Amino acid sequence: MPHHPPAAFSRLRTLLCSRENADRIATRVCEETRSPVSVLRTDFPLQPFRVIASRDVEPVLSGMVEHELMIL
């Protein structure tokens, strides 16, 4: 898939792809599952952030982790 500059995306797509949206989703998943959740930064423009269960973060992905949420 060709790389698209951010301006090529709609306002809604830009909102959905934002770090703030990834953080919001990660918080909800963490609260619902009561398990640690990580936010990863990707190189894919349509999904620049990915929310994943921390237990599923493989060593090759560890460099992509922006932060981890957990309930104490």
Image: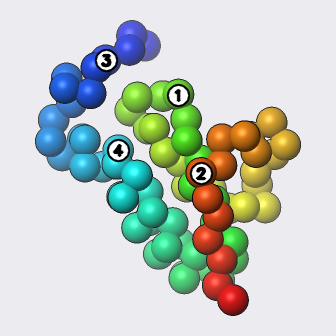
- Mark 3 burial class by Cα count in 10 Å: few <14, some 14-19, many 20+: few
> In the figure, is residue 27 to the left or right of 54?
left
Q: Which mark's residue is nearer the viewer, 2 or 1?
A: 2
Q: Secondary structure at mark 4?
A: loop
Q: Secondary structure at mark 2?
A: strand
The residue depicted at 55 percent of the width and 35 percent of the height is: 42
Q: Which of the marked residues, 3 or 2, is nearer the chain's N terminus?
A: 3
The residue where tag 4 is placed is 17
> In the figure, is residue 32 to the left or right of 68?
left
Q: Which of the marked residues, 2 or 1, is nearer the chain's N terminus?
A: 1
Amino acid type, label 3: His
The residue where tag 1 is placed is 43
Residue 1 on image: x %, y %: 43, 13
> In the figure, is residue 55 to the left or right of 22?
right
- Mark 1 burial class by Cα count in 10 Å: few <14, some 14-19, many 20+: few
The residue depicted at 15 percent of the width and 35 percent of the height is: 10
- Mark 4 burial class by Cα count in 10 Å: few <14, some 14-19, many 20+: some
